[in-house]
Amino acid sequence: MKCTLGTVELRLAEPLRISRSTTTARHAVQLSVEHQGLHGHGEAVTSVYYGLDTGALHQWLHRSSRALARFPDPETALAALPEDATSTPPAVTAAVESALLDLAGKRAGKPVHRLLGTSTAPTAATARTLGITTPSRAASFATRLADRGFTVLKVKAGSADPEDDIARVRAVRAAAPGVRLLLDPNGGWSGSAAPRLLGRFAELGVEAVEQPVAPGDPEGLARLAARSPLPVIADEDAVSFEDARRLAGRVHGINVKLAKCGGPGAALRIAALIAGSGTDLMLGCLTASSLGIAPAVHLADRARWTDLDGHLLLAHDPWTGIGGDDGTVRASTRPGLGVHPSPAPAPAEVRP
């Protein structure tokens, strides 16, 4: 098998502000694996939080490419993927597995969800993220999204003054009274303030809250969840399979992102682990193209909450094929991941 790498800039349509940072763009390193004239594709995106820049992603994916060249076909390479590849960044492992699944699906004439055990193409209402902004802007955005068909909105929180977050959620609720609301402080609340704030947001009809307090104290998060009036979903505190094992049955949900857990296989293992524990699955993502989001869409039937809108935040998505503009993401029935390059001009190639 022959591998090639390319890097594109993914610029957001508008800056996304969360409690710890503001994002205007990411770079995506895209892996193409060729075998007998067919190509499989995967993507890893840069992340300051996870310590991955373009150069690091290129180095890791180049190393993985050399390893893949030794396998006779993608099926053999998939079977050889370790369940716990701790020596490789999970985002890299996820990109490699996704490219192999894409290629294996094309060889078999099957979409990836069938390779992963689901006969019917998953569809799911995806949350659409609203960054930290003024209540009036958030309300205007919420109205437009609801008019387009979105039924789930995720409001970012963690402002210096929590009353600003409350005002934003109140404005969104008034502007789009029929939508389900999720809240994500990205660990921006103090442990002392969190119980009171959870009560305030429960009164506003918020359905669930992701990672209310800073990561690093999963026991504290579990204690908070036990007395919370609304579901608490672990995100930054639930990166690995072992993290999920510690929190299973002790929080209401775990946000599984393929880039942090290591790919579709790892996500399925976490889903199996928490099944029946009282902890539900949320599928999340980083800001990425449709290529990077597609593998998770093929798993969307397993999730209670779906937050796969990373491609919808982009000014231009260089790939297409999973929908989402109307509030629903749809796994393709085409062989492989079912995505293909967007007909619009792709962003300029950049070097690491």
Image: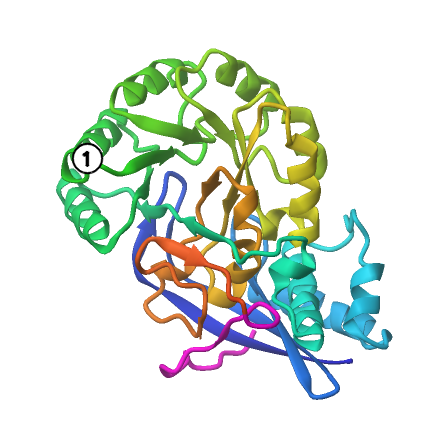
In percent of width and height, residue 107 lies at 71, 77
Secondary-structure class at tag 1:
loop
| Residue 298 higher or lower than 171, as above or below | below
Q: Residue at x 55, y 23 (%)?
A: 251
Q: Is residue 96 left or right of residue 294?
A: right
Front one among 293 and 133: 293
In percent of width and height, residue 273 lies at 70, 33
Q: Residue at x 30, y 30 (%)?
A: 160
Is residue 195 visible in the rendered image? The answer is: yes
Furthest-top residue in view? 227
Front one among 266 and 4: 266
Front one among 254 and 195: 254
| Residue 116 higher or lower than 32, as above or below | above
Q: Which residue in the protein does label 1 denote? A: 177
Q: Is residue 289 left or right of residue 84?
A: left
In the rendered image, which quarter is residue 162 located in?
Answer: top left
In the rendered image, which quarter is residue 277 located in?
Answer: top right
Front one among 107 and 261: 107
Does the magenta run of residues contain 188? no
Is residue 214 visible in the rendered image? The answer is: no
Q: Quadrant of the N terminus?
A: bottom right
In percent of width and height, residue 285 lies at 50, 51
Range of magenta residues: 334-352
Q: Quadrant of the C terminus?
A: bottom right
Q: Is residue 143 left or right of residue 113?
A: left
Q: Is residue 51 left or right of residue 36?
A: left
What's the residue type where badge 1 is placed? Pro
Of helix, strand and loop, which mostly describes the magenta segment?
Answer: loop
In the rendered image, which quarter is residue 115 located in?
Answer: bottom right
Does the magenta run of residues contain 337? yes
Q: Residue at x 40, y 70 (%)?
A: 317
